[in-house]
Every structure is written in structure tokens, then in C-alpha cells.
Amino acid sequence: MSYLETTHNVYKDAALVPDVGLCCTTNAIWELPGLKIPKIMQEMNYGCGSTVHAKDLTNNPKMLYVGVGGGMELLQFSYFNRQKGGVIGLDVVDEMLEASRKNFAIAEEQNDWFQSDFVDLRKGDALNLPIDDNSIDVAAQNCLFNIFKMDDLKKAVAEMYRVLKPHGKLIMSDPTCEQPMNETLRNDEKLRALCLSGSLPIADYVKILTDAGFGTIEIRARKPYRILDPENYPTDELIFIESIEIAAIKDPMPEDGPCVFTGRTAIFYGKEDYFDDQKGHILYKNQPLAICDKTALALSKLHRDDLFISQSSFNYGGGGCC
């Protein structure tokens, strides 16, 4: 049995009998006017963060969500779209698709604005998306890509890049781990299916995205996720796993490399009203400016004593420049 078959069976069982706690299930439950999340959707919330950000969802974007789970994030996306087929939900597990259909019928009873046909549920594989090129504004996946081994992960990212329109966004939430994992953990198909042993370091994760062509990367949140301890897992040391919420934007690749925002800020506090580095960055006195890592490095090389550059917070909230 391949690791993908193991994953299929894990989520088939989770579709037939909700498994509370299967994944992190600490996603934000949006509290919005008129939005009610059915209890069954919350119980089948098999994600490790949230991919729903209002700033990504203006002007009725065409959306794709891969790995539907219980349908909670699809419902949240539909709240911002409210068009027939405005959100495509894709899954390879028949039982999960059927469970989502039933959950949407409940959601329709509890939300007078929602119609089940707002969501176009389709069977499909993340490694070969049945979606046209350059047709999606916002694509998302939550706690799915970390399950894939490296070659399959690269294929899944490349497929998302293919279907996105220029400047479209891939919004993701996945477990990450900065510590090395032994081969026993890495090769444990069940632990990989449970979103544990496939966790990569953030830098490796980002490189996969930029190698696929994404010119802008935003790391929006970094949160504690799980501990793998020697008593319960095949490891000699405690392994700390975090989850990140990240956006990869299909911007053109800059000549000097991708713009990666990791929550760094520059503050000018000199005698003048502003500082202009003559490379497109104007910093007004005592006004924090979000900057990408590439710009942070360039500014640090100026060795100015009136310029503060913060370390990465891994919590980028938008704005700023590259």
C-alpha cells in the first residue's frame, strides 16, 4: 500500500465517522453577521489554521479549495462570494465529497443566504487538477500538501500555479518543523497521513513555492501545533511542530529573486523627515514600513545608525514594499 492509499483510507474513515482532533482543529471559526457554521462541520474541521482572509476575497473571486474536509472553509469562502459555482471544492475521497454535500444541506437550513450550488463539488486529484489554466483567482489548501512526499509536493504546487490567473493567490496552512526528523518518522505512512511526519522547515517550503514561479510569498502566521515525544513516537528527542499560514502570489519573478515577507519592518528615526534609499523605498520618520527579506538585507548593508530593521516575526499583515 502506498502512502497516498493510507492517506485515502484515513480520510475515508474520517468522512464516515467524524474524528474530532484528527488534525489541529484550532482554525478560526469566523464570527460574521448571518454566518452559522454547523456543528458537524466544526467536528470535521481537519485543518491546522485558516485559509480564509477577507482581504483575499474582494470582487467575487473564482475560488478553488483542494481537500474539502467537512466543508467549513468552503462555506466561509461562499460567504464572500455567493454565486453559483463560485467556489470549486475538490477531493479525491468519494466519502468526503458525500459528507460535504450532506453538511451543505444542513448549512443551507441554518443560513438563509447560502445555497448549496454556491459550491461546485468535484472529484479530483491535487496532482492533476481538473481545472483550466489561468482560471482561478484564489486557490487554497489546508493541512494537505504536508502529506505529500517531495516529488508529489512539487507536482501539487506546480498544478496550483498552473490554474491560477496572473497575480492570483495560493493560500495555505500547513505544519512545519525546523528540527530534523529521523527516517522512521519520515517513512511512517500513518503519521504522514495525520499531518505530522511530512512537516518541512519553512525555508524549504518557501523554496518549493518560489521554484514553481511564485514571485511573492507572504508568511501571515506561525503557531504552535504538535509535540512528538519519545514516549509516544519513534524519536529520541522532543520534536516541536508549528503551523504556518502562507500566501504564494503568482506575480512575475523579480530579476533579483522573489519577494518573501516574513514580518520584518524598517523604521527610520533620523533628523530628516524621510529616508529614500533610491531603490524604491521611502521611509518616513518613525513610520514603520513592512519590508521583504530581500529589502531588509539590502538596507542592513547600508550600516546606518538611524535605521532600525526588525527580525522576522513570521506574522505579515500586508502593506509595505519589496
Image (spheres, helix red, strand yellow):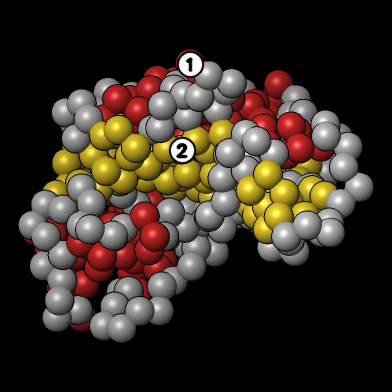
Determine whether, in the image, residue 84 is placed left or right of residue 127.
Answer: left
The residue pinned by badge 1 equals: 151
Crowding around mark 2 (Cα neighbors within 10 Å: few <14, some 14 to 19, many 20+) is many
* Residue 15 x %, y %: 32, 52
Amino acid type assigned to the residue bearing label 1 in the image: Asp
**Residue 1 against residue 170 in the figure, above or below:** above
Q: Which residue does the image show at 31% across and 65% down from the upper left?
A: 76
Check disc 1: other Cα within 10 Å, few if <14, some if 14-19, many if 20+.
few
**In the displayed structure, would residue 2 be above or below residue 301?**
above
Dot 2 falls on a residue whose secondary structure is strand
SS of the residue under disc 1 = helix
Q: Could you tell me if residue 205 is visible in this image?
A: no
Q: Residue furthest right?
A: 305
Residue type at the position of mark 2: Ala
Residue 244 in the image: state x and y as whole percent: 59, 48
Q: Is residue 316 above or below residue 91?
A: below
The residue that disc 2 covers is 248
Is residue 221 among what the camera can see? yes
Q: Find the residue positioned furthest to the top.
A: 151
